[in-house]
Image (cartoon, helix red, strand yellow):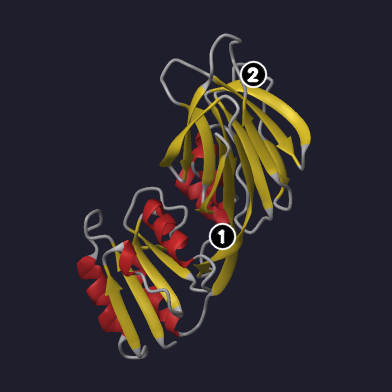
């Protein structure tokens, strides 16, 4: 192991002291160690490992930066729930020993890419790690969204919105919206209506090879539906009746380090009680 990047967001996480401690431990066997505190400082050149001190949100932001660069991420939980973080702080020293001994596995995970078609103009956003969401813009109003999978009509949801989730994101917004949890190594996507008007509307799991098209329709004939577009919780813009979104598996994957101590299913039981 030659190059390690340690990321800690000094604006959000009180982890700078821990980052320095990790650096002192790793210096005995690792040639180059760099601590960065801004997302813009994350290097584009190859690194053996990117260690992230923070919560799931911080891990997601780093994953966006390193997707497609073959830099595996080891998350150290300085947040709350921590589904994406592998190491809890009390077990940090043990985990560093396992890391230096090479006792870990690397999991490849999929991300999303989305083409946004609005007013005759197209743009592509991504990679999106957790989910892409088309949701109502204003409180108290629903939107109507039609879903097509590989150009085959699936259903129209009158709801607060519709989200397309990766397996990684299945334990995030998707879970709150009553969607299913998927093991992180699955090659699948989830289509989940958010607070649908009809109780018969349920989430659907499709292959990650599928192309999903979402179209904003009209909930009422006399009005245009107004929506917001979000990727991983970040506002990407506004949308309205007639706009379309084409979501597919991104070309880039990202990599997470699994130490082997706790399985996804055990983590699920512990984190969710």
Q: Does the image show residue 115?
A: yes
Name which quarter of the figure residue 263 lies in.
bottom right
Of the image marks 1 and 2, the number of the one nearer the N terminus: 2
Q: Which structural element holds mark 2?
A: loop
Residue 83, percent from left and from top:
47, 52
Residue at 58 percent across and 52 percent down: it is 112
Q: Residues within 10 Å of mark 2 (few under 14, many from 20)?
A: few
Q: Is residue 174 left or right of residue 45?
A: right
Placement of 70 over or under 159, stated as above or below: below
Count of numbered tags: 2
221 or 38: nearer the viewer: 221
126 or 189: nearer the viewer: 126
**What residue does disc 2 label?**
199
Q: Residues within 10 Å of mark 1 (few under 14, many from 20)?
A: few
Q: Does the image show residue 273?
A: no
Residue at 49 percent across and 71 percent down: it is 72
Residue 60, percent from left and from top:
44, 55
Residue at 75 percent across and 31 percent down: it is 154
**What residue does disc 1 label?**
263
Residue 188, which numbered label? none
Distance from disc 1 to disc 2, alpha carbons, whole Å, reads: 33 Å
Instruction: Quadrant for the N terminus, please.
Output: bottom left
Placement of 30 over or under 193, stated as above or below: below
Residue 109, percent from left and from top:
59, 61
Q: Which structural element holds mark 1?
A: loop
Residue 52, percent from left and from top:
37, 65
Q: Is residue 29 left or right of residue 197?
A: left
Residue at 65 percent across and 46 percent down: it is 189
């Amino acid at each position: 192991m030659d190059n390690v990047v340690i990321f800690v967001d000094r604006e959000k996480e009180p982890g700078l002291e821990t980052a320095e401690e990790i650096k002192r431990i790793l210096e005995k066997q690792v040639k180059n160690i760099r601590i960065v505190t801004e997302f813009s400082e994350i290097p584009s050149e190859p690194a053996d490992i990117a260690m992230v001190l923070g919560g799931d949100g911080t891990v997601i932001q780093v994953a966006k930066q390193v997707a497609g660069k073959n830099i595996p991420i080891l998350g150290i939980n300085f947040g709350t729930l921590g589904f994406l973080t592998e190491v809890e702080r009390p077990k940090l020293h043990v985990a560093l020993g396992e890391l230096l001994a090479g006792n870990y596995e690397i999991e490849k995970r999929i991300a999303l890419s989305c083409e946004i078609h609005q007013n005759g103009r197209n743009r592509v956003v991504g990679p999106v790690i957790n989910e892409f969401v088309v949701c109502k813009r204003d409180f108290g109003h629903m939107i109507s969204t039609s879903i097509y999978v590989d150009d085959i009509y699936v259903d129209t949801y009158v709801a607060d919105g519709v989200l397309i989730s990766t397996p990684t994101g299945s334990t995030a917004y998707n879970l709150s919206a009553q969607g299913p949890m998927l093991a992180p190594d699955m090659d699948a996507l989830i289509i989940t209506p958010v607070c649908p008007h009809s109780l018969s509307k349920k989430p659907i799991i499709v292959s990650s090879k599928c192309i999903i098209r979402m179209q904003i329709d009209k909930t009422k004939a006399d009005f245009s539906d107004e929506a917001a577009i979000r990727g991983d919780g970040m506002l990407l813009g506004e949308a309205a009746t007639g706009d379309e979104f084409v979501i597919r598996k991104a070309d880039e994957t990202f990599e997470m380090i699994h130490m082997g101590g706790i399985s996804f299913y055990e983590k699920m039981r512990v984190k969710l009680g």
